[in-house]
Amino acid sequence: MNKRRAKDLWSQLEKRKVVRVALVYLLLGLLVILVGTVAFEKLGVPSYVLSLMLVAVLLGFPVALVLAWVYEITPHGVRKDSAGDIESITEFEDYPDNIPSIAVLPFEDLSEDGDQAYLCEGLAEEILDGLHKIPNLRVASRVAAFQLSGQQADFKEVGRKLKVQSELTGACRKSGEKLQISVQLINTNDGSTQWSFKCERPFGDVFEIQEEIENTVLKVLNITRLQSLQTPRQRVDLKAYDLFLRGLSCFAKSTTQDNVYARQLFKQAIDIEPEFGRAWAALAYTYGYSYMYFNATDVNLIEAKRTSEKALKLAPDLAESHVSRGIACCMDQNYKKAEDEFEKAIELDPKNFRAWYFFGRAKVHEGDLERALKLFERASMVCPEDFQSVLLQAQLYTSLGEKGKAIEITRKGIERVKAMLELDPNDNRALNMGAFALLRLGQGSDAVKWMARSLKNAPMDSIIQYNGACFFSLAGDVARALDCLEHCLIKVGNINREWLEHDSDMDNIRNHPRYEKIISNFPE
């Protein structure tokens, strides 16, 4: 048994509490035998009874271990043990067609100078995030809904493209200490107004306004919000909150430079409000993303660990704190701790896409591809618009030798990619990953065009460049694949050698001398 398998087996034994049961059983068994020896001697019980008791204790030991492996004791009674696989025990099902669904679009900027788009996006995102945590309500993802911003899409187009029954639109303006805001809840089937709201109040009431909008939307949609699932937003200095919203707007753009801008804004927010837990979690994300996607330096890793620890200390009930900590632990190759953090995040917020998605990526790093498949499947259910979690499943099925299943999943993934490109034809991530899907489906000519477009549009994006290396490796263009891999490393670098070892897409170029030379420069 190799070290990885031995480590995985020990981890499973601990997770299923088999080790704990074994120790407790041995101690109790020893105690029973000692007490029995003394008591039986005084009572004059025949010696063969003690021998039978010893045999019973020994025979019962493997039975206890088997039962500990198979079953667990929960507050709801004894049930089959899921080995800690939260994707198996979390009460979450794919969205049925008949449940309410809504899209929250970015609010229109009514400021005179048109410089408050960040505020309009931030407020809409905060409301979207609050609604997204509600069970039995499907909320279109931020990525999908915000793609329609500025396209002047009518209600029917929103309903068709995002597959929702209602849309929440609005407009806002901050003037001095006053906040003007208006929103409308519109039925996407006929364009009728289900509810409207307009107010001008002190900016200090922003948190109450957000909650008022969320609660009224739920009331109109006839959905009950369980108080036990509601985590009150932390009230912080308004200047810090304004900077936080600016940071969210930058971070959502997912580019190297915008990630740096977001980091600076989150730091400024923390300087004003040092106990701002959400800002610490967001700051930790910027370092974790930098290490994972843009620049795998020791500084980014150290800061990802430090800031996520701080977020966890200040906001332990915030799922984002645990996700940011999980990412940092994964990058540090502390996979057991990463798993604990992701599971806690999912426990706090079962509909947190990042928790499921990055948990899956952590399992790929760890080499547990079958578990990663389950987690990516859950991520794709939590966010029905996301194509990445679907196409990564196809890649894993290929690595596991299940080509038929890979093709089946790829067909589902390419439909999501096309839906995203309908919203934004220049979505480089969709073009990039969609190229893989087309290649697997035998549409090589279109696949090369999509990949070339994404590489041209994002020459500084290491993930795009890395995917280009994988793509051309699969396409049999070894020289171009190696060029992309080297370009990824030279430009910014982020993929570690461990990930490369588990990526079957690289199989066609592994034996090339240039490949060994390139990956020797990748971090371990």
Image: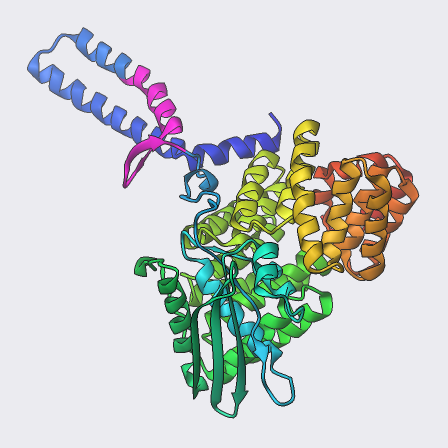
Check the image and name the residue furthest to the right.
479
Q: 144 or 499: nearer the eye?
A: 144
In the displayed structure image, the side of residue 173 where residue 495 appears, left or right: right
Query: Which residue is at a point 58% across and 43% down the rendered structure image?
Result: 376
Q: State which quadrant residue 287 falls in.
A: bottom right
Left or right: residue 443 versus residue 232 is right
Q: Position of residue 206 (x, y in %)?
A: 44, 79
Image point (67%, 30%), residue name: 400
Which residue: 85% across, 38% down?
475
Q: Quadrant of the N terminus?
A: top right
Q: Is residue 68 above or below residue 135?
A: above
- Name the residue at the left extreme: 43
**Residue 69 in magenta stretch:** yes
Extreme bottom residue here?
A: 176
Q: Can residue 209 be seen in this view?
A: yes
The residue nearer to you, when weighing 417 against 394, is 417
The residue depicted at 77 percent of the width and 41 percent of the height is 438
Task: Where is residue 412? Give x, y as percent.
Answer: 65, 40
Name the foreground residue: 17 vs 435: 435
Coloured how? Answer: rainbow
Of residues 201 and 45, the one nearer the viewer is 201
Q: Quadrant of residue 408?
A: top right
**Marker count (numbered):** 0
Percent coordinates x, y for residue 130 in the rendering: 44, 64
Query: Residue 10 lies in magenta, yes or no?
Result: no
Res 301 visible: no
Residue 171 vertical placement versus 430 (above, below) = below
114 is higher (above) or lower (below) than 290: below
For the record, the magenta segment spans 57-81
The answer to which quarter of the image holds residue 370 is top right
